[in-house]
Image (tube, rainbow, N blue to C red):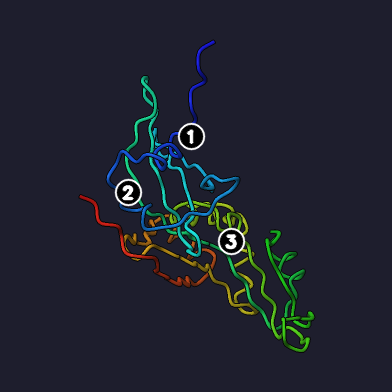
């Protein structure tokens, strides 16, 4: 029987074991990766055209490192490595008067996380207290790999039908699209927003709150 063709993940793992591209050495030798069962843990594989982008996570860092591979008739072609920011994009609705259930009923959307004013709040080493405001959050993709602009587009597509109802909450709530963008200081990308997404953001009546973080070690030198 013919030998099974390796997957994109297997091709990327083989590249990490025996690098063939200078950028693989440059990015990955400077980091210690998260492992599962003795192998670097693959956090996701995204497809960009015919390029498979295999995502790994460095220990104690908030960004991803990516090996890019492409299938050819002769096997997998290794295109190189790069960094990818970890972007968390969410719709956040905050109120001092409405409960999370009130906001869910008003928008017709289910949150991914929520608490209500008056809820008990327990923190390690502190006395229990009560929440002083409601926070309702819709973050459908969480910390999964993905580009900021793609996650923003998908969030705004998801909320587009509810936009008039969300906008109507503006008098009683603080409505924002919040972004936590954690990048590798040696290779930071921008946060582009297309015209259609700006239009949909305005239709929500939402602000845009972007927190930028950069970290990580210096890139390794290669010959």
Residue 93 sits in quarter: bottom right
Q: Is residue 84 left or right of residue 178?
A: left
Residue at the (46%, 43%) spot, across then down: 54
* Residue behind mark 3: 163
Circle 1 — which element? helix
Residue 193 sits in quarter: bottom left
Label annotation for residue 25: 2
Closest to the observer: 142 or 96? 142
**Discs 3, 1 touching: Cβ within 8 Å:** no
Q: Earlier in the sequence, mark 1 or mark 2?
A: 1
**Above/below status of 126 relative to 161:** below
Closest to the observer: 165 or 175? 175
Residue at the (50%, 60%) spot, across then down: 59
Q: Position of residue 55 (x, y in %)?
A: 47, 47
Closest to the observer: 146 or 29? 29
Circle 2 — which element? helix
Mark 3–mark 2 Cα distance, whole angstroms, equals 46 Å
Q: Position of residue 150 (x, y in %)?
A: 46, 51
Mark 1–mark 2 Cα distance, whole angstroms, equals 18 Å
Q: Earlier in the sequence, mark 3 or mark 1?
A: 1
Label annotation for residue 10: 1
Tell me the mark number nearer the camera, choosing from 3 and 1. Answer: 1
Determine crowd level at label 1: few under 14, some 14-19, many 20+ residues with C-alpha closer than 10 A. some
**Above/below status of 44 relative to 151:** above
Mark 3–mark 1 Cα distance, whole angstroms, equals 43 Å
Q: Earlier in the sequence, mark 3 or mark 2?
A: 2
Circle 3 — which element? helix
**Above/below status of 179 relative to 33:** below
**Discs 3, 2 touching: Cβ within 8 Å:** no
Residue, far left: 223
**Above/below status of 20 relative to 218:** above
Residue 215 sits in quarter: bottom left
């Amino acid at each position: 029987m013919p030998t099974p063709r390796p997957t994109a993940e297997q091709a990327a793992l083989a590249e990490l074991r025996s690098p063939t591209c200078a950028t693989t050495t440059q990015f990955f030798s400077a980091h210690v990766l998260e492992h599962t069962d003795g192998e670097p843990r693959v956090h996701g594989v995204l497809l960009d055209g015919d390029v498979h982008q295999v995502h790994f996570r460095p220990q104690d860092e908030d960004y991803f490192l990516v090996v890019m591979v492409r299938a050819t008739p002769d096997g997998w072609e290794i295109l190189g490595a790069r960094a990818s920011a970890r972007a968390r994009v969410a719709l956040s609705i905050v109120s001092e008067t409405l409960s999370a259930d009130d906001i869910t009923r008003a928008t017709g959307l289910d949150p991914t996380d929520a608490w209500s004013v008056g809820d008990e709040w327990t923190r390690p080493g502190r006395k229990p207290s009560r929440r002083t405001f409601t926070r309702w959050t819709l973050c459908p993709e969480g910390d999964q790999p993905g580009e900021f602009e793609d996650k923003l587009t998908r969030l705004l597509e998801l909320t587009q039908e509810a936009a008039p109802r969300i906008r109507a909450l503006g008098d009683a709530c603080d409505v924002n699209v919040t972004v936590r963008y954690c990048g590798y200081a040696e290779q930071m990308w921008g946060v582009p927003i297309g015209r259609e997404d700006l239009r949909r953001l305005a239709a929500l009546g939402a602000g845009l709150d972007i927190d930028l973080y950069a970290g990580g070690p210096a890139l390794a030198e290669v010959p």
